[in-house]
Image (spheres, helix red, strand yellow):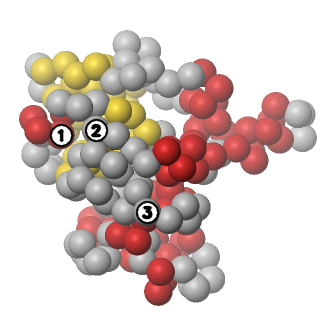
């Protein structure tokens, strides 16, 4: 896992539920690759087309609330976002995200200080996010969860761990 990376901010609000991340009507598509262009469709239909690999989603509280659909974090991983930084997460989404290789970070203040389009620098070794000269502490992530993200999720991580 890269310990240092940077990306452009895409800013979302509070209570972004799994129906906003990937609406039900698109779950019948043949693959996550086919679904990913519909990410955030009810909120901002154009957004998925603008997200580039390495970009960072910054959100308010309770990100990933709603149903436990695993496709929600899968879609974000398929969009190749570096991470999501939110004030808080729905518990099941949090675990599903790591299981699907998506890094989640938490911070209460960053959302109120950044704007869409800003560049953030993430330093996992120091558990910090930098916005210009401002530093924001993020909760440290357990090493096994970081390894899981690096492997691409729980299944590839377990295969690697078990030598398969």
Find residue 127 and report its image quarter: top left
* Residue situated furthest top in the rendering: 126
Can you tell which of label 3 and label 2 is closer to the viewer? 3
Residue 58 location (% of width, % of height): 26, 45
Q: Which mark is residue 111?
A: 1
Can you tell which of label 3 and label 1 is closer to the viewer? 3
Number of numbered labels in the structure image? 3
SS of the residue at dot 1?
helix
One can see residue 16 in this view: yes
Can you tell which of label 1 and label 2 is closer to the viewer? 2
Between the residue at mark 3 and the residue at mark 1, the CA separation in whole angstroms equals 21 Å
Count neighbours of disc 1 (C-alpha within 10 A) and say few if under 14, some if 14 to 19, many if 20 or more. Answer: some
SS of the residue at dot 2?
loop
Residue 133 location (% of width, % of height): 11, 19
- Residue sitting at x 28%, y 77%: 42
Count neighbours of disc 2 (C-alpha within 10 A) and say few if under 14, some if 14 to 19, many if 20 or more. Answer: many
Nearest to N terminus: mark 3 or mark 2: 3
- Residue sitting at x 31%, y 76%: 41
Residue 105 vs 11, above or below: the answer is above
- Residue sitting at x 57%, y 84%: 29
Nearest to N terminus: mark 1 or mark 2: 2
Nearest to N terminus: mark 3 or mark 1: 3
Report if the CB atoms under discs 1 and 2 are less than 8 Å apart. yes
Count neighbours of disc 3 (C-alpha within 10 A) and say few if under 14, some if 14 to 19, many if 20 or more. Answer: some
Tag 2 residue: 87
Report if the CB atoms under discs 3 and 2 are less than 8 Å apart. no
Between the residue at mark 1 and the residue at mark 2, the CA separation in whole angstroms equals 7 Å
Between the residue at mark 3 and the residue at mark 2, the CA separation in whole angstroms equals 16 Å
Tag 3 residue: 66
One can see residue 10 in this view: no
């Amino acid at each position: 896992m890269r310990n240092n990376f940077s990306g452009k901010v895409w800013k979302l609000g509070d209570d972004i539920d799994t129906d906003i991340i990937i609406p039900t009507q698109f779950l019948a598509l043949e693959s996550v690759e086919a679904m990913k262009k519909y990410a955030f469709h009810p909120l901002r239909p154009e957004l998925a087309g603008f997200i580039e690999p390495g970009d960072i989603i910054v959100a308010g509280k309770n990100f990933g609330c709603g149903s436990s659909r695993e496709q929600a974090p899968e879609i974000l991983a398929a969009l190749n976002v570096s991470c999501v930084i939110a004030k808080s997460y729905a518990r099941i989404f949090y675990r599903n995200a790591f299981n699907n290789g998506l890094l989640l970070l938490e911070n209460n203040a960053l959302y109120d200080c950044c704007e869409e389009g800003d560049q953030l620098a993430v330093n996992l070794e120091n558990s910090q996010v930098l916005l210009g000269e401002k530093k924001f502490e993020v909760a440290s992530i357990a090493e096994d969860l970081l390894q899981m993200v690096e492997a691409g999720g729980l299944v590839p991580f377990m295969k690697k761990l078990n030598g398969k």
